Each structure stands twice: as structure tokens, then as C-alpha cells.
Amino acid sequence: MISEQLREEVHKCIKCGLCMNACPVYKQLYFEGASPRGKVQLIKKVLEGELELSERFHELLFTCLLCENCSVNCPSGLKVDRLMKAMRAELEQKYGLSWQKRMVFHLLHSSRLLPFAMYWGRVFGPTLMGLFAKNGRVGTIPFSKIPRVNSIPLIRQYLQTISPSGQRQGRVLYFTGCATNYLFENVGKSIISILQRLGIEVLLPKAQMCCGLPIFLSGARKMALDNIRQNLRVLLAEKVDAIIVDCATCGAALKKEYVHILEELGQDAKEASAVSKKVLDISQYLVRFDLAEHLGAVPDRVTYHDPCHLLRSQAVKEEPRRLLNMIPGLEFVEMSGADACCGGGGTFQWEHPDVASGITNKKISAIEETLANVVASGCPGCRLQIHGNLRSESIRVVHPVELLAKSMDSRLLDT
Amino acid sequence: MLRPEVLERLASVVGPDRCKTAKEDLLTYAYDAYVREFLPDAVLFPKSSAEVSEIMQIAAANDVFVTPRGAGSGLGAEALAKRGGVVLCFTMMNRVLEINSANRYAVVEPGVVIAEFQKEVEKHRLFYPPDPGSAAVATMGGAVAMNAGGVRGVKYGVTRDYLLGLEIVLPSGKVMTTGTITTKDVTGYDLTRLICGSEGTLAVVTKITVRLLPKPQTKRTLQAVYDAIDQAGTTVSRIIESGIVPATLELMDKTIIKAIEDSAHLGLPLDAEAVLLMDVDGDPDTVERQAATVAGFCRDQGAREVRVSASETENEMLWTARRSAFGAVARMRPNCVIEDATVPVSHLTEAIKKVVEIGERNKVQIAVLAHAGDGNLHPLILCDLRDRDEMERVERSMDEIVDYALSVGGTLSGEHGIGISKSKYLPKQLSETSLGLMREIKKLFDPQGILNPGSFLEDRQL
């Protein structure tokens, strides 16, 4: 059941409505049930016993990106997203998950099945993705724009301990997340090469698993517990300066969600809070260094998109921008509404493609207006969504570290 | 209850996607920003006046209650289905139809959000001043129905002062227009301004034509900090007497300051008793001069610090924080009732002291916020609806605040409206003759009494 502390939250809502204008989903649908205020009302009615868990309630609670705009805009300080997440867990117990989600989460939840599936995914990927597709699209993303799986998972391309070039200045543990490990290997390679040049030893534990966030945000908290426990064990095994992540979502999970979930399930959260204090987004870690001497020119026009899980969950806003602005020759241009959600929301864009595409189109237009040829963003979910919906082939979507690594390479070539 | 065959006909006007009848959906239309809930039987989302007309015809033929609603940010259950029936929700009818720079007017549908409309006209270097605290949420239709005011009232007036004309649907389903697009218009009774502020009891507004102003060239926000609330009050009087008309003149007491600071972290002084937040706007020279004069007045009256904002971003942050005051204060206790009594501005200081005294005597926590420039008080009464004894004391305090405001020539409500929250006080301010005439007017528009039943004009308590 929902924890006592969260139950009190519903009484904080005075229905002022300030969350509605902040909610990208409401701004597409324009009815209260889609708004945070409406959902809080329904959760309150459920907790007060006036409403049973129902199909419609289930549907409305999943008509949400969990972008956290409501939580940061609530003048009463109501933690809408936490309430939603806890309620989703209740719903999962009654309604279970769709078979597609069950299948994917089963993979993400298993340390053996996932690599196996990804290996075959490279061969049979298109066929497998067909299970999720309608009219040649997975949600809003055309088939052809789904990235190919890494030929070898990133973690298997390196040793467990990667030595720095030159004298050791520090030591970090790198939690790659599934996206970098299986889809976007260049992000991982960039990070490792940057850290090596900065004299940082990188630990890449083979036993790390999916952070579990997609699983528990869908409500399957118990299933995610195995991931949480295994990861906490791995992350606390070695003494390091920091645990770094390149994925906004993994970062949010390790910094906040693990603690919340364990606390709400009435379990010991000491290890989770110890981990949460050590976790840094790669941009937070890198801004501490004086990078100027390592950087060469990158003549791109770049705009930056704030991932929800980085900006609102972790309050990381300036660090990625500062990194980009350090790069010589790079022309940084801010898009309007950089902090607006891209419409991806994990499985949201697949479950609600019509709503998602309305939100994504605004983002794409904002990107196009900047005339940038590169969009940087530290979230693989946003990357998939933005890349998948860009109309122009000439705009690339990258992680900021990829530009940074490119800049370091270009310096080496110059000298 | 709504008969199934009637519901089916109503639903066929808008189609299944724009008709909600599931219990889960109805529960989300049972509230506004007041504290009572009333469950409708159905919610319809029209997108054109033709649809509204058709809906009203069916409703009239079948005696179905219809209550129009915008964003549901009202403070007195005005847009709730107090006696059941259909809620007619305008959030999906939300286009800006025209912005005319040559004649400085705009035409909008009722579901347009006020703040979004303001942003839109500002792109044309025009200005729509009415700026209620709820502007980021509230709709233009709601603003017309409630004659919304806001922080700029002292200089720029309220919604009523910007209306040129309306398209309305009568309860019978007949569509008609009022007013024109010209600034001057004395043709016939001024029905536009009768509909405005009628709280959705006379007709359903489907199109709104508003007058626009040129956007002021520049603006400065001043923030004056006081150790005594009296000093802030006398500063307001001094400014008004001097002939300077600031664009805004807001007063916050220490409880409000603390609540805003806790939620927005702007570095407001937590040890201050009162803060005045003021805008002066106009051409740069005048603004410079007036800002200096106003700052002088503040210091003369004992302000311990006067800050002039350095940038547009800082202005924006201060005003965003101010607009969130209602919600920010609400985090202190489970519920918050806003009072809206308004006094002649010369009584402001006295009125604030009176409110504080009433709160202390009744053992009720009251935070004071005021649109000080026009005497519009917003005592925020903190409470817990679940505590019956406390709610009785809250009720008593409200009675006393109202009595005081009326005793000095003020009004029950400056801008929030009557709804069901203040209807019991109406006879204190309006004579039997006046109320009787209003009821006759209501009957003329709505002989069957199907539009927004349970409204302020009805005797019985809900």
C-alpha cells in the first residue's frame, strides 16, 4: 500500500491549477483527467475509498510522461510524480503489465537473457521490433530510424579496469546503462577515452544490470528489486571517487528512485542512500576539470535539449551547457523551450503515439528554428525520440560527451 | 439525473471523444479552486458556437441543467454543476481568431488561456492588461464570466474595461452578438458588460472581442521591505495621493513572504513584516523618474530597504513567485480559503490591522496579501476542512471581515465573485429591490432556469 507519508500529499493540493499549464500531456488533450490536478484528485478518491482501482483510472494514470513538470511547478510542493509512481505500483498488482512490457522487462530484469536477446537482436532485430510496430512505426518512430544494436556490448569490449594514460589522477566507477551498452556504444567509448586522457582510472563492472527504472515506473516494483539489489552490491563493492552515469534516466534511478522505492516498500535504504551520494552525471563530473588544454575545434552549430530526468529529477542544467561552450569553434545556440519534454517518456510514446507526436513536433520545430546541425542531449530516450521524429536527415543527435571526445581528437590531430 | 436518450443526443453533437461520462472523469470536474465538490452527470467539450447552440436547444427542450466552465480555477464553485447536469467545458475551444494591430483589438474563443493570449499579443507589441493571479491557467471565457481583475487593476482596470463585444448563446440556443469592434459604442443597452461578471448565469459566451493597448515601452519592478505593516500601508496612501499611478502595487505580509520564499527561493527577507511589490511602466524617462519618486516615498515611510530589479528576468521571477502565493501559502496547512473583501484605498492600513485583529481574536491563522493600490484585500485563511471547530471559527472570521468592509463603504468581493462561497452575504450589500431586479433579468434570459443553477442568485444554501 502507499506509504503514510505519501498519502498525506494528496491533501496539499488546493486545485489552483498551476500544474495544468506546465503539463505537456494536458496541453495536448485539454481535459482534466489528463492533468496532474485531475490525477491527484483521483488518487485522493482511491485513498479515501470513494473510487475503486478501475480500467479508466489505470488508463489515465498511464496518460502521463512522468516528466515532473507538475512537481517542480507546484507551489504547494506536492510530489505529484512520486504519488503517481506509487499508485502505478498498486495498479500493476491488480492489472499486471501488457505482454509486450512483460517481455521487455523480463529481459531487462535478467542478467543472462538480456545479452542473449541483444545478440540475436542484432540479427533478428527488425523482426522482433515488428511485435511493437504499427504501420511501420514503433510508436512515433519509423522503423528505419530505430538504431542498430552494438556488434558487441560495450562492457565486453573493455577490461573491467581501464587504466588512464599517464599518471592516475582519480578513479571512477562507470555505470553504463543498457542504452550505451547495447545501442549507443560511441557514448561509452567517448567517455572512456575522455577519462583516460584526464588520467582517470575507470572501473567497468561486468555484473551491472539494467537500472530497472523502466520496470518500476510501469509499476512492477517487486520485479525491479532484484535489479536494485544487484546494482547496489556492484556499486558499493569498490572504493571510488564517484559513480558516473551517462544516461539521465539511470542517474535519476540511482540518485533518487532507489531510495524512494526501498523506503516506500519499508526496506532498508541505507545502501541506496550511500550510492545516491556518490552518483554524478558525467557532465557534473567533467565540469570540474580544466579541459581547455585538451580541446580542439569542432565547427558545429549545436543546440541542447534538457532531458526531464536530468533537469527536473537531478537539477542538472548548466553543466552540459558549460561543457559545450568550452569547445572551440562550436557555435552554441539555445532553442526555445529547451526544458520542455520531448514527448518520449520511455514507453509513453509507444502507448500514446498521437499525444506524443503533438509534443514531439513542438520540440522538432524548436530545434529547426535554431538552424543547428547537431542536437546534444544526455538521455538515450530523448535521443531516440528526437532522432526518430526529425524531418531533416542533416541534423544529428548526440550525447554532449561525443562532441567533447571529438574535440579532444581534433586537438590531437592538430598537434 | 440525465435521461440516457437525452445524453445520447447531447453526445452526438460533439462526438464520443468530447463527451465524458465515466465516473473517473466526472470526479475530475467536481472541483475548482474552492473547497466544495459537486459531481456533474456529463462533461461536454464544444468546439464551435453552432455546437453550443445545438446543445442548449437540446437542454432547453429537456430541462437539462447546463453549467459553463473554463479551466476550473474559480474560487467559489461558480463553474461547478451544483445541481448536477451537464458541464460545458471550453478548454478545447481555444483558438485566437484575430489580432488586429490597425484597430488594436483581438477576437478569441473562450478556452484561450489568458497568459498565452497575452504572450501572443505581445509579439505584435500590443498589450492585454487584465492579469489575475490565475492567468497561467484561467481562460478568457472564465475571465469574462467572472469579470476577472488582478494585480494591474490599480492602473489598468479589469476585464470589463477591455471588452468590445461578445458572441453569446442564450439558454434557448439562440446565438447573438453584443457590442462592436469600435472603442466607442452607445447603441442600445450595454449587454456586453451585463454578461461580464454574470458568473455564467445569463448566457454562454462563445467568442470574445477585446480592446488592446500598445505595449508599454519599459517597466521597472520595485521591492520595498518594512519592519511594520503600517509603514507599508501609509506608503500606498502616499503614492496614490501623489498622483503617480503604478501599474501594480502589491502588499505581502510576513506569512506570505515566508511561504513564497520557501517555494521559490528568491532571497526575500524572512524577518520583514511586510513587502511592497510595485511596477512602474511607460516610456523610459517617465519610468526612471517615477521609480525614483516611489522609492523615495518608501524610504520616507520607513522602508528599511528598497530594491529596484535589475532585469526583465528578475521582474519575471518576482511576479511568478507572487502569482504562486495562493498555492505556496497552502502548503502550510491542508486548506486555504481566500477572502476578497475590498475597501476604499484610504482605509487600507486600517483594514489590514482589522483583519489581523479578527484572526487573532478568533484563533484563526490569516496571511494577508493585498492588491493594495485598489484596496482589494486577499486575506488567506489557513485551515483544515476536516476540523469542524476550526471551520466554525473561520466562518466567523469571514463574517466579520465582510461586515467591516461593508461598514467602510467597501464590497463583498473585489474580483473573485460570489458563487456559493459568498451568496449568503449578498443581502448585506444589495437591497431587496436590487436583488429582485437581478432575478428578473435572470428570468428574462433563462426562463427555465437551466443555466448554472444553484448560482449566487438563488436563496437556498447548497
Image (tube, coloured by chain):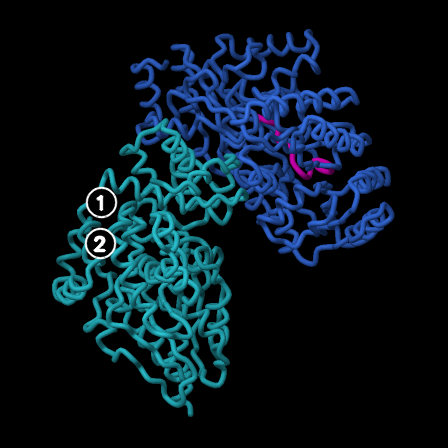
Chain colours: A cyan, B blue
Q: Which chain carries label 1?
A: A
Which quadrant holds the C terminus of chain A? bottom left
Image location (x, y in percent) of residue B343:
75, 27
Q: Can residue B288 be seen in this view?
A: yes
Q: Do the residues labelled 1 and 2 touch (CB within 8 Å)?
A: yes
Cα–Cα span, label 1 and label 2: 10 Å
Image location (x, y in percent) of residue A14:
52, 35
Near mark 2 (Cα within 10 A), the count class, few <14, some 14-19 or many ≥20, is many
Image location (x, y in percent) of residue A91:
28, 40
Image location (x, y in percent) of residue B425:
65, 16
Q: Which residues lie in the magenta part?
A: B145-156
Give the amino acid type for the residue marked by disc 1 in the picture: Leu
Residue B281 shown left or right of residue A193 in the figure: right
Outermost residue to the bottom: A415
Q: Which chain carries label 2?
A: A
Q: Name the residue under label 2.
A: A105
